[in-house]
Image (cartoon, rainbow, N blue to C red):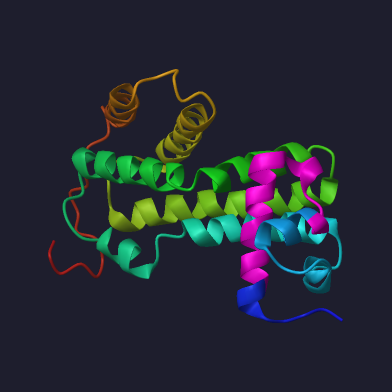
Amino acid sequence: MVRRNPERRAALLDAAIEVLAQEGARGLTFRAVDRQAGVPAGTASNYFANREEILTQAGGRVYERLDPGEAALASGLQGPRDRARVTALMHDLVDRVAAFPTGFLALLELRLEATRRPHLREILTERVRADVDFNISYHRETGRPGDATTVVLLWLALNWLILERLTLPDLFAPEQRGDLVTALVDRLLADQPAPTRPVPGDAAQ
């Protein structure tokens, strides 16, 4: 019988994320999740039908925890629509993801595992594509400089910068990483003018 307690399920998925980050996908077993969560043996198997289910749901849980929330998204629609604002948002994004290192590392493990599991690859592809599409739509909604390609390039570059920060933390000094984010935005948006038309629904414009 599959259990339905949402808080317990979330706690088990959080434990699965930690196991993925610490031991890799091969180390993700029901027993390991139970041990990490500090619950009786057999608990995880009561919530998840099989190992693939907990793998895929752990990925979704990472995105859930990285969600900035409606208030933060709403605040992003306010203020100037210029390169400086984009730069600040990119710094915030890098810091927010890096503050949840096990989540990012768990996603990397899931991606590696997806090369061997077509169903997992399909699910991750859909989830990541939805994330990219959302970022493109949000960028357009805020009316900031840059097009869809700019957003994708930022997404790709920042993901790799975060990877270096979490896996090879001594490669770049903290101030270098900050300078790289700023330089990345500056160069990608160098020829992109700030919007001249008001964003629909924004009375401040």
Q: In terms of image quadrants, where is residue 127?
A: bottom right
Q: Is 78 drawn above or below residue 157 in the view shown?
A: below
Query: Residue at the spot x=31%, y=32% of the render?
Result: 185
Q: In terms of image quadrants, where is residue 146?
A: top left
Task: Single out the residue that lies furthest toward the top.
Answer: 171
**Is 53 covered by the magenta stretch?**
no
Q: Is residue 114 visible?
A: no
Q: Is 95 drawn above or below residue 65 in the view shown?
A: above
Q: Is 200 drawn above or below residue 112 in the view shown?
A: below
> Where does the image place residue 194, in percent across and percent down from the top left?
21, 42
Quadrant housing the C terminus: bottom left
Q: Is residue 116 visible?
A: yes
What's the magenta region?
9-31
- In the depicted view, which residue is nearer to us: 88 or 204? 88
Task: Single out the residue that lies furthest toward the left.
Answer: 204
Quadrant housing the N terminus: bottom right
- In the depicted view, which residue is nearer to us: 6 or 44? 44
- In the depicted view, which residue is nearer to us: 125 or 95? 95
Query: Residue at the spot x=82%, y=78% of the render?
Result: 2
